[in-house]
Structures are given as C-alpha cells and as structure tokens.
Image (spheres, rainbow, N blue to C red):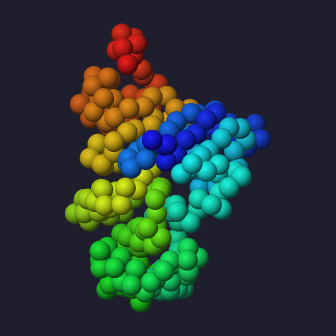
Amino acid sequence: MIPAIEVRGLGKTFGSVVAVAGVDFAVAAGSTTALLGGNGAGKTTTISMLLGLLLPTTGTIRVLGEDMVRHRWRVLPRVNFSSPYVDLPHRLTVRQNLTVYGHLYGVAGLKGRIATLAAELDLESFLDRASGNLSAGQKARVALAKALLNHPEVLMLDEPTASLDPDVADWVRGYLTDYRLRTGATILLASHNMTEVERICDHVLMMKEGRIVDEGAPRDLIDRYGRATMEEVFLDIARDGARPPAGEEAAQ
C-alpha cells in the first residue's frame, strides 16, 4: 500500500539555522501517527512543508501519491489542518467563518455539512457568535470543525485537545478515532499530551534537533526504553538524547 505521506531527505534551513536536517519517514494510509519532540525540534516546520506552506531546502514530499512541491494543487483539496493557535477572523461569526472556508474548499451541501459538524462538535449554541468572543475550548472545537469541512483524507493536527477540559478532550479523541475508522483517513498529529498519544496513535515519530531520532508503536517504544509511559520515553529523549540499550536496538 502506498503511504499517505512519504518524506525522503527532507531538509529546511533558514540562513545558517538548520530547522529540519534531512529526515526520512512514511505515514501509513489509514493510521494515526504522532510527530513528537520538544519545542524547537522541527515539528512545525515539518508540518508546514507537508502542507505546502514552506518549500523544502532539500528532499521530497509525497502526499496521497503526489509530489507536494510540483503538484500540491492536486492534493490540498483532500487535506486539512487544525491548530488551536491559529485564530479564525475575529469579527466573523463561527457560521460565517465555516461558510467562507467551506466555499474555499468547494464543499458540496455546505449548509448541511456545517449543521452536521455543529451537532457533532457541540457548536450549535455559539454558531452565530463572533469568533473573537469564544473561549479557548470553543475555539479549539471550531478549529476542528473547520478542518473536517472537506472530509479530508489526510488530517494534520497541532495539539488537537489543547485548552479543552478533560471530559471534552476525551470526547474529541474518541471522535477522531471514530472519524478515522469510518472514513479510512490518515491523521498526523503533533501533541505534548502523551496520554493522548498512547490512546489514539498507531505509530510515533520522535524528533530532536531537526532529526527523527526514533520511531515505533507507542507500546514498542515504552518497552524498548524500559519505561512505564510514553511521557517517560519523551523525557528520556528530550533531556539527553537517550537511546535504548545496544542489544535491544540491534534486535529491532
């Protein structure tokens, strides 16, 4: 099966600063994969290149089988992105914002699609409220609705449950898992919530200083590092670049 995302030798420099240093990875179609790393590891730059927002300095990116440098116009209608840190226009209502983005994506039956998402994500009580007057949790749910408008085949998420209370965050994780199972979509998420990663991710890519330093299923990484949780694995790698014992690494 062709990977939903395939990256070879991907690098990005800004002057003398190396943000991404020639990484290789693949994201299996229909999987939920986490891209993890501390602040400055290169996650945001990598996702920006996957979305076609930044041109790579070196390497290639293929999304849904298409070259993102030469043919991203073929792919972008089938992809979407959500981040609670990217605000929608504050003066527009939630409904107006979703309508604008729906038209940009050419969503058929847009009014019905907005109504469905509003019901599923519990937006109905503030659909006609200005987006600038929403709470952080409400903004996060609207951002997710925006990202789902076009029934994306590849959904990229940055901290999808940030600012949500534990109950709503748990519901969103369940919703994302159900969406993937119903549609066969591929999800790539960046998160600092390791419980979230353990619960919904099939595979993990660990980044540090612009490089992929390890990868595997969450349970495999936990066992390989001799830890109890993904949070402990994350801290091992983030703090001192720890690697599993040589015998275990060689056995992979």
Viewer-nearest residue: 128 or 202: 202
Looking at the picture, how far across and down is residue 231, in whole percent? 32, 37
> Where's residue 58, x and y in %?
71, 38
The part of the image, by quadrant, that contains residue 247 is: top left
Residue at (56, 33) in percent of width and height: 24
Please state the horizontal and vertical placement of residue 100, each as a whole percent of the image.
Answer: 55, 81
Q: Tell whether 173 sits left or right of 87.
A: left
In the rendered image of this protein, does residue 200 appear above or below residue 77?
above
Please indicate whether residue 25 sits to the left or right of residue 69 in the image.
left
> Is residue 132 shown above or below 41?
below
Q: Residue furthest bottom?
A: 128
Return the residue found at the far top: 247
Q: Quadrant of the C terminus?
A: top left
Location of the N terminus (image quadrant): top left
**Could you tell me if residue 11 is visible in this image?**
no
The residue lying at 59 percent from left, 55 percent from top is 51
Q: Write the residue at 45% across / 37% down.
A: 205
Q: Position of 171 compared to 96: left or right?
A: left
Residues 114 and 127: in front is 114
Q: Quadrant of residue 165?
A: bottom left
Q: Is residue 147 above or below residue 40?
A: below
Residue 36 is left or right of residue 92, and the answer is left
Q: Nearer the viewer, residue 24 or 126?
A: 24
